[in-house]
Amino acid sequence: MRVLQFGDSLLPVGAFSFSNGLETAVEIGVVHDVETLRAFVRAAVEQAATSDGVAVLATHRAVSVGDITGVDRADRAVFDRKLNEEMRTMTVRMGRKLAEMAARVLGPSTPSDWLDRIKAGATPGCLPIGQALVFAALGLSERDAFAVHQYGLATMMINASLRLMKIHYLDAQAVLFEVDADAEEAYWRVAKLGLDDMAAFAPGFDVLASLHVRAHVRMFMN
């Protein structure tokens, strides 16, 4: 049940405010139907697996052995790999909200300690790190934490698509179902990687993000 709670797309951490680049992709026509939406979301989730997803696993393992330095190193690794301001804003804003929620719900714990370090400016506070810390504090597996991270990104984009496109809500759910099917293989592909192996090559996303920064009219914060 706790996997369901913390993996819920309605978790109050602000995901509704972000589209992960989908808004500009729709505006300029890169995404215009179900097929292009599927390809765009799948590409985003694949990139997340080999970058932020690696940090999720590294953080879960670090906190499990009491390595707080390792947690902060993973946090910085995520932040440093966000190439534009809006992506950095997205991950730290949602990360801090998750930490605040966990501190209220779980009480004194590793997520609340992490929140203290965020407030002190000692660590950025990126969302994937918070997800790993919460799941470790609940005694849940790194595999669950990875799955929630991947699912959260996919649902953020699918929910955004319903506000941005003329798409049937059942078609949107079919896209989510298909993209989610990749998570198992993605976990095993990155399970042996470390922070130095974090990598993502998606220049199209970076270009779309840079265009969104300068947009005069927009629905989402990124």
Image (cartoon, rainbow, N blue to C red):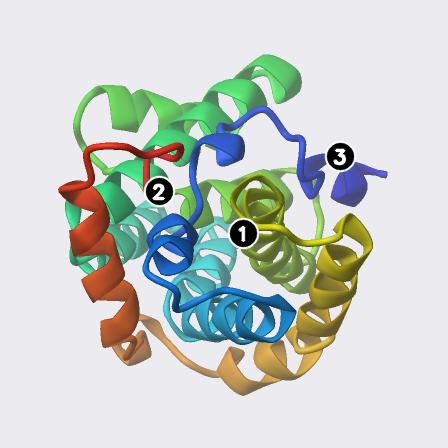
Q: Which residue is mark 1?
A: 157
Residue 125 visible from this viewpoint: no
Q: Residue at x 58, y 67 (%)?
A: 33
Tell me which numbered mark, 1 or 3, is placed earlier along the sequence.
3
Task: Give the quadrant of the N terminus.
Answer: top right
Q: Residue at x 45, y 50 (%)?
A: 128
Q: Which residue is mark 2?
A: 91
Q: Nearer the viewer, residue 157 or 184?
A: 157
Q: Which residue is mark 3?
A: 5
Task: Give the quadrant of the C terminus.
Answer: top left
Mark 1 to mark 2: distance in Å? 14 Å
Q: Residue at x 30, y 66 (%)?
A: 205
**Where residue 171 appears, x then y in whole percent?**
76, 61
Tell me which numbered mark, 2 or 3, is placed earlier along the sequence.
3
**Where residue 188 appears, x then y in whole percent?**
61, 83
Mark 1 to mark 3: distance in Å? 19 Å
Q: Residue at x 59, y 57 (%)?
A: 154
